[in-house]
Image: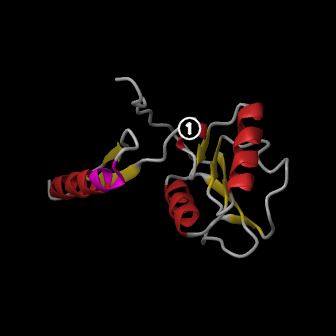
């Protein structure tokens, strides 16, 4: 089990989730967090998602304060590292999109259907394997919608 992460499901309703960077990865993660009821705060000078609070600027120290969890997903290694450092200093779990070794949690491929939720993560060796597994789990869960 070395290197594997423990799956933990939490109630995000109303909890503050800060997503720094809202490009392709950040917007997907922000959308999932919003769909699970989190109060999503997106820090990005340009992009946001519907239903999220938008701080239309670059990240500044202090943005993570008060968060339940944080995602660093900019295209800047320096900013992502700074976000991760701030989150860890505040005791806020953080997922750093470009540095697996800086993550307190991995953002899973989320699979929903039939009142069930599954999350899939890998040991980091194969994103393709994770995606294929998630597709198969989603297909199976769709069958439970019929009951």
Q: Could you tell me which residue is drawn at 34 percent across and 46 percent down?
A: 117
Q: Indicate the position of residue 147 as horizontal and vertical percent values.
A: 14, 53
Foreground pick, 106 / 77? 77
Q: Indicate the position of residue 129 as horizontal and vertical percent values.
A: 27, 51
Q: Which residues are magenta?
A: 126-130
Q: Indicate the position of residue 127 as horizontal and vertical percent values.
A: 36, 53
Q: Is residue 6 above or below residue 84?
A: above
Q: Could you tell me which residue is drawn at 53 percent across and 69 percent down?
A: 24
The picture quadrant where one finds residue 74 is bottom right
Of the 4 image quadrants, the one containing the N terminus is top left
Foreground pick, 26 / 139? 26
Q: Could you tell me which residue is drawn at 74 percent across and 39 percent down?
A: 85
Foreground pick, 71 / 1? 1
Of helix, strand and loop, which one carries label 1? helix
Q: How many marks?
A: 1
Question: Is residue 102 shown in magenta?
Answer: no
Task: Give the labeled residue for mark 1.
Answer: 101
Q: How is the structure coloured here?
A: secondary structure
Q: Indicate the position of residue 126 as horizontal and vertical percent values.
A: 33, 49
């Amino acid at each position: 089990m070395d290197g594997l992460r423990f799956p933990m499901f939490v109630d995000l309703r109303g909890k503050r989730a800060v997503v720094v960077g809202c490009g392709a990865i950040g917007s997907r993660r922000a959308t999932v967090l919003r769909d699970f009821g989190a109060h999503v705060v997106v820090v990005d000078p340009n992009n946001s998602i519907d239903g999220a609070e938008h701080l239309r600027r670059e990240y500044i120290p202090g943005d993570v304060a008060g968060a339940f969890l944080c995602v660093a997903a900019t295209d800047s290694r320096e900013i992502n590292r700074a976000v991760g450092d701030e989150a860890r200093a505040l005791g806020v779990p953080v997922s750093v999109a470009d540095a697996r070794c800086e993550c307190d949690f991995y953002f899973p491929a989320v699979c929903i259907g039939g009142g069930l939720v599954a999350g899939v993560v890998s040991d980091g060796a194969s994103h393709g394997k994770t995606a294929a597994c998630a597709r198969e789990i989603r297909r199976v869960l769709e069958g439970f919608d019929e009951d």
